[in-house]
Amino acid sequence: MVFQDRDCPPADDSAAVHVEQRESESIVHAVVRAVATRNDVHATDLPPLYDRIDPDAMAALVDQSTSRRSDVVIGFDYLGDHVVVSQDGHVCIYDE
């Protein structure tokens, strides 16, 4: 799904959590880190991300958009929140 109604990083402080992908981590790990932070749990305590989105496809979209210098924003619902991932490594989590 592509969303244009919510930006990441947000133009305001509406995101409950906002993290940036670290140089040494994949975008999938950044998403897991953001969701774990939001839910105050260890990443290994989260339900599988692949139950909500294909992590390999998400990573491929982000990687391809970065190399092609195109804007991509991916949004999906996970654990009662709305997760937004942008091609520049920002992950935002919004209250549903």
Image (cartoon, grey):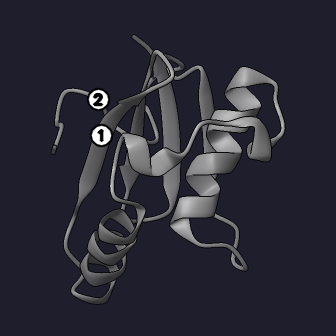
> On the picture, is 66 further left or further right than 91?
left
**Cβ–Cβ below 8 Å for labels 1 and 2?**
yes
Other-residue count near label 1 (Cα within 10 Å), few / some / many at <14 / 14–19 / ≥20: many
Q: Residue at x 27, y 82 (%)?
A: 64
| Quarter of the C terminus within the rendering | top left
Residue most toward the bottom?
67
- Asked where in the image residue 63 lies, by quadrant, the reply is bottom left
Other-residue count near label 2 (Cα within 10 Å), few / some / many at <14 / 14–19 / ≥20: some
Mark 1 lies on a secondary structure that is: strand
Q: Position of residue 15 (x, y in %)?
A: 52, 23
The vertical placement of 61 against 80, above or below, is below
Q: Disc 1 residue type?
A: Gly
The vertical placement of 79 against 70, above or below, is above
* Front label number (1 vs 2): 1
> On the picture, is 67 further left or further right than 17?
left
Residue located beneath label 2 in the image = 6
| Quarter of the N terminus within the rendering | top left
Residue most toward the top?
96
The vertical placement of 78 against 30, above or below, is above
- Asked where in the image residue 51 lies, by quadrant, the reply is top left
Residue sitting nearer the eye, 76 or 23: 76
Q: Position of residue 57 (x, y in %)?
A: 29, 68
Q: Disc 2 residue type?
A: Arg
Residue located beneath label 1 in the image = 75
The vertical placement of 6 against 81, above or below, is below
Q: Position of residue 48 (x, y in %)?
A: 55, 45
Mark 2 lies on a secondary structure that is: loop
> On the picture, is 6 further left or further right than 11?
left
Q: Residue at x 32, y 36 (%)?
A: 76
- Asked where in the image residue 77 lies, by quadrant, the reply is top left
